[in-house]
Amino acid sequence: MALAAVAGCSVVLVVAAALAVALPEDEGPGGEVPGLAAEHGVGLGVAVAVEPLLWDGDYRDVVTANYTSVTAENTMKWDSVQPERGEFDWSGPDAVMDFAERGGLDVRGHTLLWHNQQPAWLAQGSFGPQELRAIMREHVGELVGRYEGRIAAWDVVNEPFVDEGTELRENLWYGVLGPDYVAEALWAAHEADPGARLYVNEFGIEGGGPKADALYALAEDLVERGVPLHGIGFQGHFVHGQVPENLAETMRRFTDLGLEVAVTELDVRVPEPATDAQLADQAAEYRRVVEACLDVAGCVGVTVWGVTDAHSWIPEWFPGYTAATPFDGDYRPKPALEGIVEALSRRPAPVPS
């Protein structure tokens, strides 16, 4: 959900050489959390930005020591990948892939179709259905196809519903292609990489309610029609004190359709200035989210949105809020990390059937 103003979204030059120098071949997950997550068979991911990934050793260390996968925060979005029509820039995505593969980390692809972060040529263009469909299929085919077999899951359609409500969003794709653009995008991604797990990613559904009902109806229709939808992403951008108690219950509605689920963009923002008591409560909220995932057989993982508070999108987009991630701006772990560890430590690993 984070927009382009988040640090690290600019085009990075000489990426491959810089990353080869920055990251030793044998660097990989080495902290307590990756091992605990592996015992449960779930992933624990984090959204990364390209520039600190390339130039900040402390940033890389936090990622490799505490997470099992990475999501490209901005650099796989349309305005970065295809800033001009037919001109693809792979420097940023390749940097993320190179870092992940050298470090033994999985990668989640984010995102193929979204109403934000579109290049001007696309957002301001005038396209008929045939041309826009061809543009969409080319972009999805190039991006997903480039990393075929290397990216396990993709957020194919991001935020298809209006912010507050049950209607499909009147975005470019809906306006020209109609409501079935979601299915068309899923089919295009499936054709580019038949082995990838394909998701619809949405916010504001975590506690159930009308929007979750609308997404459920869409997902049910897609499944019944045989469209290659494999999972639902629960973004999980929470306000402190508002993490729903029924997250696991809401997830199970979708897994009952035969889908998998994941928490894809977790953060818990706290009003400024964050007090010790609030951070302790935040730790309990992080624990609750991870426990919810562990309670749902079809939940495959949790991804935190931002490596540290200094790299979080929250202060810019939600003035007056801060401290949303498990690490502070000086790379020190916060109680939220302890909450994650407690969730993974207190639950027995699942017994194979």
Image (cartoon, grey):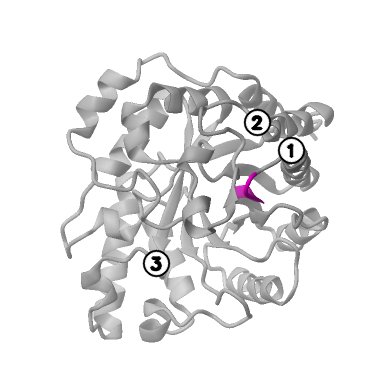
Task: Tell me the amino acid under the disc marked 3.
Answer: Asn
| Residue at image coords 16%, 62% | 86
Q: Which residue is mark 2?
A: 334
* Within-10-Å neighbours for mark 2: few <14, some 14–19, many 20+: some
Q: Is residue 267 magenta?
A: yes
Predominant SS along the magenta part: strand
Residue tagged by mark 3? 116
Determine the CA span between mark 2 and mark 1. 8 Å
Q: Amino acid at mark 1?
A: Ala
Q: For mark 1, does the 10 Å Cα neighbourhood hold few (<14), some (14 to 19), or many (20 or more) residues?
A: many
Q: Label 2 sits on what residue type?
A: Lys
**Cβ–Cβ under 8 Å for marks 1 and 3:** no
Q: Quadrant of residue 301?
A: top right
Residues tagged 2 and 1 counted as in contact (Cβ below 8 A): yes
- Rounded to the nearest angstrom, the CA distance separating label 2 from label 3 is 31 Å
Q: Earlier in the sequence, mark 1 or mark 3?
A: 3
Residue at which label 1 appears: 283
Q: Nearer the viewer, mark 1 or mark 3?
A: 1
